[in-house]
Image (spheres, helix red, strand yellow):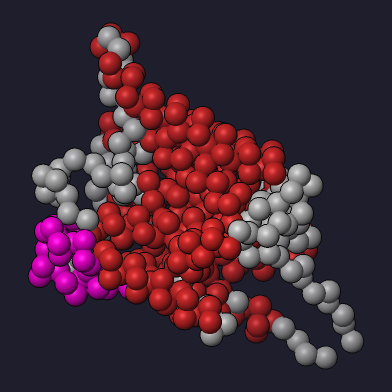
Amino acid sequence: MTTVSAPRALPRWAGIDAARGLAIIGMIAAHTVPRPGGLGGDELIVDGRPSLLFALVAGVSLALMTGADAPPPADRRSQHRLRLVIRAFALIAAGVLLWLLPHGIAVILDYYGVMFLLMVPALFLPRVGLAVLAVAALAIAPALRDAVERAGAPEQEPLATVTDYLLTGWYPALLWVPVLAVGLLAARAGLGRPRVRLALILGGLSASVAGYGAGALLPQLPAALGLTDVTAEAHSGTVAELLGSGGLAAAIVGALLVVLDPVDAAGAPRPVPTAVRVALEPLRALGRVALTVYVGHVLVIAALSPLGGAGRFDGVVGWSILIVLVVAGVAVGLACEALGRRGPLEAALSGLSALPARRARVRD
């Protein structure tokens, strides 16, 4: 009889769930809140930033699914890579299907699937390797995107679709690798360590100030310096945007870990004040069913498309849809937790990715 040691039990980080919930609220708001000047009007604070926060949390989740700061030995890593590949293709398929509906939303799921595929080779890199990957991708990917756009993006398939997913689309996977790598690095370093949280907060704030500062100040310099086109606008995919919004995301994750998963100087857990826990429980509950709520909100907006569609809802209609969707999402999260279950789509995705391991399991 073969004995297999049980995997190490990992904590459920309330701060990570809350960050995921905040990202979902931001994405729903971006699709429902009335926009001054219409669809092409001024940028809202919920444009672009929530999706980058979700990407950072996705990087954290990749580590949490694979042992966090104690990844499995080399001979057991292939099954984790396979599970991630299956998860990625499932997200791509779901995203492609959602794109077919009349909602006006730039669906993110298929782009996330491509990001997960890109992260498969990096899944078990050492922390130094992840840091090098993040810096290198941040420096190279935007420059590569700019070169492709100057030369003219390919129009023939499948190269056009590949280029869109990797470099020129709404959520260019190659450009977002640094954000996922930072999330993966943080979890590999240990989310319960005070210095890791401090690095997320201070490093994130510093990067955010640098990114948004560059986007605001550099275009004001003389045109001869060639910096007038620097921008940190949402979905611009520039180094400034990735630093600004990605850094803000890191600071938010670090702050929520401090608030909802407090530890002492040695890293031992401390109790969460009741008022804080109760106040942020809806956010945490929403984050536990983020995939279910995201897909649900796309379906609802598609059904309500005669009222305007994403970015076109008027006044009280848009705000009402936002409130109803968020309250419904929180209710789903609380109900699933009360029943001891995962969200429906979270459970389905996890079960699908685990199928190869189940088939390979031998009873003896």
Q: Identify the magenta region.
A: 296-321
Which residue is nearer to you in this view: 130 or 58?
58
**In this picture, is 151 found above or below 164?**
above
Identity of the residue furthest to the right in this view: 1
Which residue is nearer to you in this view: 289 or 198?
198
**In this picture, is 351 found above or below 314?**
below
Residue drawn at x 87%, y 82% as measured from the top left: 2
**In this picture, is 19 found above or below 349?**
above
- Residue 303 magenta: yes
Residue drawn at x 74%, y 69% as measured from the top left: 9
Q: Position of residue 218 (x, y in %)?
A: 34, 18
Asked which quadrant contains residue 110, the reply is bottom left
Asked whether residue 114 appears in the rendered view, the answer is no
- Position of 288 with respect to 186 (left or right) is left
Asked which quadrant contains residue 101, the reply is bottom left
Q: Position of residue 102 (x, y in %)?
A: 18, 68
Q: What secondary structure is the magenta-colored segment mainly?
A: helix
Q: Quadrant of the N terminus?
A: bottom right
- Residue 21 magenta: no
